[in-house]
Image (cartoon, rainbow, N blue to C red):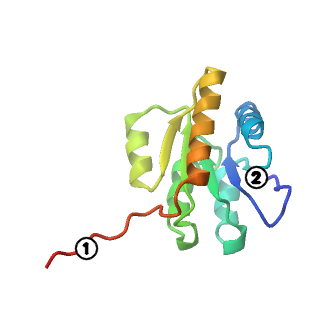
């Protein structure tokens, strides 16, 4: 895992094995939000290991997760992250080339906050990333809706 510039703060953890995809994402993020601290993990095993012993202060504000990773794939990483109470309020955006309806359905069932298909067109890629990051880094703190009130 490449470390963040500020060891106490990570705005976005990008779990992406492709150097080309990561460079495009990093360039896009820094173009409109140069202050973001971005951390990269190259495979799922590193993420699972990191979040098996993490402290709350070391949590990212947002996770961008590719599904097709070497070692532990993104689907298993998603389930692992959602199984940790410390990460319950950290938004996870699946950013992948998979347009499989089964992947989309399963990722939402496993707790993904968004599922984004990686556009090939750079302008569309940039707009997609900007919209997702702007939303998830500025969205209200309420990620989980409150429990329904019973009308007894």
Helix, strand or loop for disc 1: loop
Residue 85 marker: none
Which residue of the protein is positioned furthest toward the right in this rendering? 5
Q: Residue at x 86, y 55 (%)?
A: 5
Q: Position of residue 19 (x, y in %)?
A: 76, 35
Q: Residue at x 63, y 43 (%)?
A: 69
Q: Earlier in the sequence, mark 2 or mark 1?
A: 2
Q: Is residue 32 left or right of residue 88?
A: right
Residue 149 marker: 1
**Which of the 4 quarters of the picture holds residue 61?**
bottom right
Q: Residues within 10 Å of mark 1 (few under 14, many from 20)?
A: few
Which label lies toward us, 2 or 1? 1
In the image, 114 versus 74, the foreground residue is 114
Residue 59 appears anywhere in the view: yes
67 lies above or below 88 = above
Report how many numbered discs are placed on residues in the image.
Answer: 2
Q: Position of residue 39 (x, y in %)?
A: 76, 52
Q: Residues within 10 Å of mark 2 (few under 14, many from 20)?
A: many
68 lies above or below 4 = above
Q: Which residue is mark 2?
A: 39
Q: Residue at x 66, y 23 (%)?
A: 122
**Which of the 4 quarters of the picture holds residue 22?**
top right
Q: Residue at x 70, y 64 (%)?
A: 50
148 lies above or below 31 = below
Helix, strand or loop for disc 2: strand
Which residue of the protein is positioned furthest toward the left in this rendering? 152
- The quadrant of the rendering that contains the C terminus is bottom left
Q: Position of residue 31 (x, y in %)?
A: 76, 35
Q: Is residue 76 left or right of residue 123?
A: left
């Amino acid at each position: 895992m490449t470390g963040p510039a500020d060891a106490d703060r990570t705005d976005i953890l990008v779990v992406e094995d492709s150097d080309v995809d990561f460079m495009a994402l990093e360039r896009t993020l820094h173009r409109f939000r140069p202050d973001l601290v971005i951390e990269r993990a190259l495979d799922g095993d590193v993420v699972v290991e990191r979040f098996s012993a993490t402290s709350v202060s070391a949590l990212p504000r947002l996770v961008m997760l590719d599904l097709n990773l070497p070692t532990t794939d993104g689907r298993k990483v998603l389930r692992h992250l959602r199984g940790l109470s410390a990460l319950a309020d950290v938004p996870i955006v699946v950013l992948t080339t998979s347009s499989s309806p089964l992947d989309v359905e399963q990722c939402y069932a496993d707790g993904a906050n968004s599922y984004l298909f990686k556009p090939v067109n750079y302008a569309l890629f940039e707009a997609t990333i900007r919209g997702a990051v702007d939303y998830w880094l500025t969205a209200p703190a309420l990620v989980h809706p409150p429990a329904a009130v019973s009308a007894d």
